[in-house]
Amino acid sequence: MLLLQKHTLRGLFCWFILFFPFILRGQIKPKGEDQTKDLPLERIIKLSPLALIDPFGPTIAAYYEQQLPARRHWHSLEVEAGYTFQVAGLTEAAKSYRLRTSYRYYLSSKWKRQRNHYTSIAFLHRQFFDQGAAFVWRENRSFQQNLPYHLRISQQSLTLNIGTTRYFGMDERFNIDLGIGLGLRRTRILFTDLPSDAVTPNIPDIFERNFKEYIEETTVKDRNHLFYSTVLAVKLGYILQKNRLASKQK
């Protein structure tokens, strides 16, 4: 029951992160800056073509960026939801999803429409699920047995990013968003439904490539790794709702 409660709380937290920008959709009116006649605040939807060649497998990723109310500077909150199929190195039954939220601070002058460069901080949660069967060693490698197992791999990362946007098309409704980042990523690998003396099946290098201190065969069922993470993002976006005050302040 306690484990179920933990999973429930984690799921509620992830969904809160995902839908938090919708709560802010033009409902907050900042003090000291006359934006009331220009609400709702700017909203952008995006897709990532690079997600289709994600190292962990082809991914469909969609983004939503919501401008936040502010007196002096342009900043926003961006969320991502992605689904991965055909996870690299795992069985055909493997599935994965990812959720990301990031805070963006644009570096251009006050309310400038051609705001291009930005910095951001982003948090990512990614989950992999798999199940299968494998011949594993038991009782100090005295014999092998074909056993079913469940595998759960979770990743959390925190990155600092820099990027730029370019606007084009009719009324500059379309944009291309380019960004790079560096941070830390924690990976937890957990096997379940295996006997305590069973040697765990091999894990693809894509999940453990920087941790050679773990021998290839081990009875450790729960592994935690921490290593550097890099981000390269290319997104194509469309502005659903402009903040017209930005154009007036050009």
Image (tube, rainbow, N blue to C red):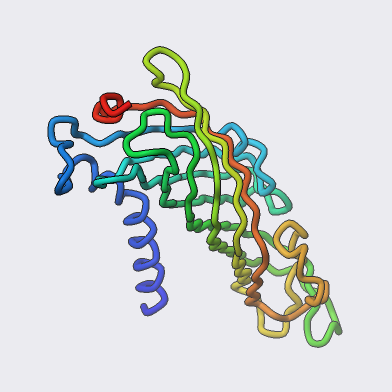
Q: Residue at x 46, y 37 (%)?
A: 62
- Residue at the farthest right position: 142
Q: Residue at x 48, y 55 (%)?
A: 121
Q: Is residue 69 above or below residue 169?
A: below
Seen from the viewer's position, the closer of residues 175 and 119 is 119
- Residue at the farthest bottom position: 140
Coordinates of residue 124 in the picture (x, y in percent): 50, 56
Q: To which quarter of the image does residue 57 belong? A: top right
Viewed as shown, does residue 162 lie left or right of 12?
right
- Residue at the farthest top position: 170
Quarter occupied by the N terminus: bottom left
Q: Residue at x 40, y 12 (%)?
A: 170
Coordinates of residue 212 in the picture (x, y in percent): 81, 71
Viewed as shown, does residue 22 lie left or right of 210?
left
Q: Residue at x 53, y 61 (%)?
A: 158
Q: To which quarter of the image does residue 85 belong? A: top right
Seen from the viewer's position, the closer of residues 167 and 204 is 167
